[in-house]
Image (cartoon, helix red, strand yellow):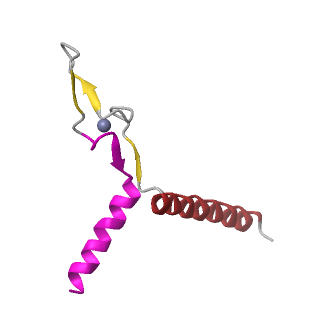
Amino acid sequence: MDPLLTLAIAVITLAALITLGYVGLCWVSPFTRCRRCAGTGQTTTRILHRPRGCRRCDRGHRLRTGRRVYNYFHRLRTEATR
Ligand SMILES: [Zn+2]
């Protein structure tokens, strides 16, 4: 067998496994911890360091990017077939 073909098959299989793993992760656990506030839901202001609600998330949880993409296409399909 051609070594380049073997390498291509290995790379494609690895990419497919990583993609399927991420899809499974988005299906099992659609929410993840917010990176801005580290899951606390609060950040501090820059100057006085006073606590305030995080603007990026809802109480420390944010939707994964893969799940957001899935929801977009699901809504698009629902509206198209209505
Ligand atoms: Zn946050």
- When asked about the image quadrant of residue 71, the answer is bottom left
**In the orientation shown, which residue stands out farthest toward the right?**
1
Q: What quarter of the picture does the C terminus occupy?
A: bottom left
Q: Is residue 38 left or right of residue 55?
A: right
Q: Position of residue 40 (x, y in %)?
A: 35, 32
Q: Nearer the viewer, residue 15 or 29?
A: 29
* Of 58 and 12, the residue lying toward us: 58
| Residue 35 included in the magenta stretch of the image | no
Which residue: 52% across, 62% down? 24
Q: Is residue 5 left or right of residue 73?
A: right
Specify the quarter for ligand 1: top left
**Residue drawn at the location 33% of the way across and 39% of the way down:** 60
Picture layout, residue 24 above or below residue 35 = below
Relative vertical location of residue 80 with respect to residue 4 in this rendering, above or below: below
Which quarter of the image is occupied by the N terminus? Answer: bottom right
Q: Hey, which residue is sitting farthest bottom in the picture?
A: 81
Residue at left offset 27%, top offset 27%: 43
- The stretch drawn in magenta includes residue 75: yes
Q: Nearer the viewer, residue 51 or 56?
A: 51
Instruction: Tell me if 40 is positioned left or right of 78 in this view.
Output: right
Residues in magenta, as a range: 56-82
Q: Is residue 49 above or below residue 13?
A: above
Q: Residue 9: x and y, percent? A: 68, 67
**In which image quadrant can residue 18 be found?**
bottom right
Q: Residue at x 39, y 52 (%)?
A: 64
Residue 3 position in % (x across, y down): 77, 63
